[in-house]
Image: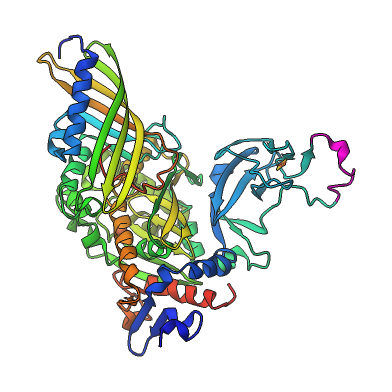
Amino acid sequence: MSERTVTRAEVEDFLYHEARLLDEWKLDDWVALFTEDGEYLIPPTDVPDGDPQRDLFLVYDDRHRLGERAKRLAKKSAHAEFPHSRTRHMISNVEVRQAGAAVQARCNFVVYRSKQGVNDIYPGHSLYELRAGADGSLRIRSKRAVLDVDTLRPQGKVSIIL
Amino acid sequence: MNPQDLDPIGWAVVDDKARGVFRVHRRAFVDAQILELERARIFSRCWIYAAHASEVAEPGQYVARKVAGRELIVNRDRDGRLHVFFNTCTHRGALVCREAKGRARNFSCPYHGWTFADDGRLVHQPIPESYAPDCNSDGALNLREVPRFDEFCGFIFVNYDAQAIPLADYLADAGDYLRMASQHGAAGAGMEIVSGTQTYCAKANWKLLQENSADGYHADTTHASYMDYIKAREGSVLNLYSEKGFGRVRNLGRGHSVSESIWGTPWGRPCARAMPSFGAEIKAEMDAVFETMAARVGRERADFICHGDRNLLIFPNLVVNDVCALTIRTFYPSAPDYFEVNAWALAPRGESQTLRDLRLRNYLEFLGPGGFATPDDQEMLELCQRGYQAHAGVEWNDLSRGMATEDGPSPAKQDELQMRTFWRRWRDLLAGAAV
Ligand code: FES
Ligand SMILES: [Fe+2]
């Protein structure tokens, strides 16, 4: 991948696109946003700056497992998400830093989840490592969704993708 | 006549061995008065897991957390002695410790400034001249220790009943299983809690989680999508169900039970059972861990620890699941239809970075609120709880499976002996039996 300058507007469009894919449950398309060595992480609520090789995370997916996560969520037997909850990913406060083809982005998020009369809110911020392709594409090398709650109560679980 | 009119508790459990019928009344899951009784007769009298010794290994270390509804401080004082205090100021009640863990030589109350040493002694009151000079001569103003606490193989328990029987007696045959959970690893250096706590909840009755945590009957349906994942990755889940595969449930006494197997589950174990996908290098490292453990604890026991799985239920609210990783899980109800869970990963001290990383990955493929299985368990508990709203119309849960063979040598994991063991103890304690 050769270098090009990535604008904040471009990153915002990319994050909005990702949010829309998640809210529309187009999870295979979401997986395709990741590079071959992509990863998806959610640190524990009491160690938000933790290291997944050292600390017990909530989610520690390499590319294979995040693909399987998406596949699983499409099944009726992924019971916590059957029938699928309705979600809405709100993205704001996007910041971008670039060093060559490596682009670091951060944003704030709020994800609303509604299922069978229960409404849950997941506030947090995400740290992205993006790869800018010469063809104008962006891919996710790493997405770390940091929950800004100190316990998963009353949400209870993170059965959706943040 | 309503069954509950018969007597205060006897109505809740039908235990008829002759007919092979075991039933639990659904009111036991929804009734606020039952919860009050559980608090008084179970949670205020049984030994309750509070912390692991590794969390307070060094002088000055503390953790502060809620244990069976009470705010506690577990700490090691500067002389190395373990304490468990109620985290409440003896002046007018404020919590004296507001951080979940750390190091402290003193606990200073934020309200009026009373300060307690790490051994609980009241060492400072602002404007002391307004108090009688001997106001604490009997020590009543020191931080209050819980009536009883004790440690067993690194597991620290508390008891809110000063008359409680000793912890080791309480644990009965479950004690050796806790010991097994403390013997993992090549180094033989004991165990440690991995940093990172999974603090979550479910909108269901707490007893449903105890039932679920060792339920061998639900795996193929509740966790069908997890099994698909393993099948896809490993080629087949059947490889591990070898001829030497064996599984059973044991009643461990005093309401405790274990669902255990050897070579009987489809996942890999960080201690120390490799899956094909782990690769040759990791397999070699795991085999070496096994040999070291065999030299230390004996080959037969090492075989059982490394190649077996155990879902251990300690009455009333401790689960030590030694499966695709080793997890400690404890929970407490704040309402009949809501409980809070704290879960941790327990791991051998001195584990190699390779195996630690594998352990954490393996843990998260199944366990925890973001895993491929735990959310589906939570969903099932919540579906049950919703079903119980109709308890006046459909009154009974059936837990009769395997009742005819429950006194035989090897009750099957898919049977419901582990739940019956829990409910019999629950019934007896709620009716007023001694712990
Ligand atoms: S309540 Fe603690 S000093 Fe007053
Ligand atoms: Fe389960």
| Residue that appears at 38% across and 64% down | B208
- In the rendered image, the quadrant that contains the C terminus of chain B is bottom right
Q: Nearer the viewer, residue B107 or B213?
A: B107
Q: Residue furthest right?
A: B133
Place of residue B407 in the rendered image (x, y in percent of width and height, measured from the top left): 38, 81
Q: Is residue B34 above or below residue B262?
A: below
B311 or B87, nearer to the observer:
B87
For residue B379, which quarter of the picture?
bottom left
Which quadrant does ligand 2 occupy? bottom left
Say if the magenta span includes residue A6: no
Q: Quadrant of residue B77?
A: top right
Q: What percent of the width, then of the height, locates residue A97?
A: 30, 14
Image coordinates for residue B185, horizontal then vertical, percent: 43, 46
Residue B354 visible (yes or no): no
Q: Residue at x 17, y 28 (%)?
A: A17
User: Which of B90/B168 is in front?
Assistant: B90
Q: Residue at x 84, y 52 (%)?
A: B138
**Relative to residue A85, is residue B35 drawn left or right?**
right
Q: Is residue A5 left or right of residue B356?
A: left
- Tell me: B80 left or right of A36: right
- Which residues are drawn in magenta? B126-137
Q: What kind of colouring is applied to the model shown?
A: rainbow
- So how many labels did they put on this image? 0
